Image: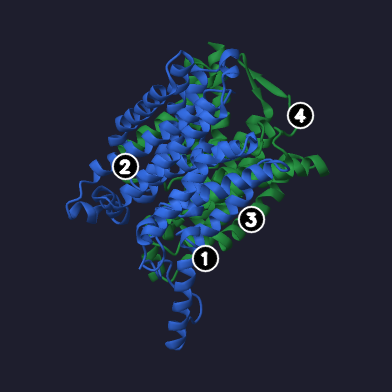
Chain colours: A green, B blue
Amino acid sequence: MTILAQQLTLGLMIGGLYGLAAVGLSLVFGVLKVLNVAHGELIMLGGYGAFWLFALFGLDPFASLLLVLPLSLLLGLALYGALFGFVVRADEETRVKNSLLIGFGLALVLHALAVRLWTADDRSIDTPYAGAAISLGGLSIPLVRLASLALAFTLIGGLHLLLKHWRWGQAIRATAEDWQAAMLTGIDVRRAYLLAFAIGTALAGAAGTLVSVGYSINPSIGLEWTLKALIVVVLAGLGSTFGTFVGGLFLGVAEAASAAVFGGPYREVVGLVIFVAVLLLRPRGLFGQ
Amino acid sequence: MRALTARGELGWAVSLLVLTVLALLPLLTHRDDILNFVFLVLLSVALAESWNILAGYAGQVNLGHAAFFGLGALVTRTLWIRGTPILPAMAAGAVVAMAFSLLIGAAAFRLRGAYFAIGTLALGEILRTTVGNLFPEISTLSAASIAAYRLSHRYYLALGLATVSVAAVAALASSRIGLGMQAIREDEEAAEASGVGALRIKLTALGVSTGLAGLAGGLFAYYLISYYPSHPFGPQWTFDALLMTFIGGVGTVLGPILGAALYVFLKEYLAVRWVDFHLLIFGALFVLIVLLLPGGLVQAGARARRLLRRGEAARGRGGPTNLGPRPSPADAPDREPHLLAGARRK
């Protein structure tokens, strides 16, 4: 019983990162109607950013978030300018299809680059406090992962406030709702797209940082994280940041539960099965708005 | 698109010449590296053409194609190792792959566009993980089979399969059902409205596509001495097919051949020094092609000519008037190329 509870607790903690990974993807998809399948690779890059800041300069991974976030933001601006800005000119159906292809090419390039630059080895940030854990009624809770969960929650809360109260945050939400109406009210829709994409990339970078602390990264984690984020987005729908976070927690727990029941190797399968099932129930799109 | 028919006899002559040279190759050279290289090109041609049928002609981007390649490999390998001759074993692999695809097809085709793509991606991953869990042991040929291994057998099978795949696509392209596929690709609702049975045609495309993928998987299983059973289910097989097809020219007969030859050449050539470096080049090339040249290399010449002409026309009108930033995100929806719409364009 304790073992099961322990596994579910760990599932909950990785679930927080699934939620964070998905929020960025969901923002970009909801606002730009662009499906960036290189989202996992952006997470991977964020992870390497934090890893190298730690390995070269000894920067604490949680502190390096302050650097990784703005750097990822810049990367997002560049990627939008170079690639996705062209995709959003098409009508919506074409946009989704083309972004899928562009994202796929980008994912390949980033993956190949990461292998070239940093080898295919598994890396993780080994802080002095990495092994610390608190015990709670027979459960052992790793501190780093708990902190990651808390930070993921904080970041999502921050995004929520940003979208709710910041001028451009409101513009982003209006654009997501109906870009034509938004344009008529004088909102610079292209600017809203750019900002949403950059923020989505920054969130991916943050998620990568947290992955590299509590877990491990290598150049090939991209596809896996893209799939996790997609599963959560499909589960939670668009439009609610906290809903997405809860969807992430649910996936983490569901994976842990299925690993406990069917054995570890099947933990990936449960999320994918849920994903396909939900897709089939809502074949016209992920989000019956 | 109809390079083979449009240029008529010349096309036939070139095809026959290429086939003859390829058929004589094992007699002309005994260098295994050359035969292995051509084998890989031929296998890739078959895989890319099989993907091209569904994506290029019917407009359905199947990102779970590896599942059918893998099923073909799994069934063929199992039967062949237990003593079934290779041809019936490959046929069985193709039948299983096709049957599985038709089983899931009706449900999968409820998904449209990108949702079909990510749904099939998830499906492929489910199969890969499950097969990896059920068959964790590496599959290796017995000493007797290794002693009896003849590369030329694999080579001729590959040549046959590649020829069949190319011929199937060429025949399909100009057939009634192929035209139905292209109508669906351009606009499924309009196709339905004008009497095309979309689901039936999409299922036909899926069946042919996955049947050929199953055969290619069987060939792979016959070729390799040892591999993990989950390996042919890996997403890289789908991605390879997608890259080769798009770079050569999606929705054309010749495109995947060109793409496969270029891809395998770069992969083998660069792998000597840099593992996976070809993916960097091909990934970048792919993005460029998606953005700038949706018809792939096959269409490069035609498109360049058209651009030249358009440039002259624009000068004739006194040039474009582009003042300030463009106001609308959908300022030119009809001029933006529909990438999956392949080669046909005004």
Which of the two discs, 1 and 3, sits closer to the camera? Answer: 3
Which of the two discs, 3 and 2, sits closer to the camera? Answer: 2
Question: Label 4 vs label 2: CA separation?
Answer: 57 Å
Which of the two discs, 4 and 2, sits closer to the camera? Answer: 2
The location of residue A253, given as percent across then percent down, is 50, 26
Q: Nearer the viewer, residue B55 or B146?
A: B146
Q: Chain of mark 3?
A: A
- The quadrant where residue B91 appears: top left
Which residue is under mark 1? A191
Type of amino acid at the residue the image marks with label 3: Leu
The location of residue B193, given as percent across then percent down, is 18, 54
Question: Label 1 vs label 4: CA separation?
Answer: 42 Å
Residue A129 numbered mark, or none: 4
Q: Residue at x 68, y 31 (%)?
A: A144
Element under disc 1: helix
Which residue is under mark 3? A75
Q: Nearer the viewer, residue B7 or B121?
A: B7
Which of the two discs, 2 and 1, sits closer to the camera? Answer: 2
* Label located before the other in sequence (3 or 4): 3
Type of amino acid at the residue the image marks with label 2: Ala
Q: Nearer the viewer, residue B41 or B286?
A: B41
Residue B130 as seen in the image, left or right of residue A113: left
Element under disc 2: helix
Rate crowding at label 4 as few (under 14), some (14 to 19) or many (20 or more) other CA atoms within 10 Å: few
Which residue is under mark 2? B205
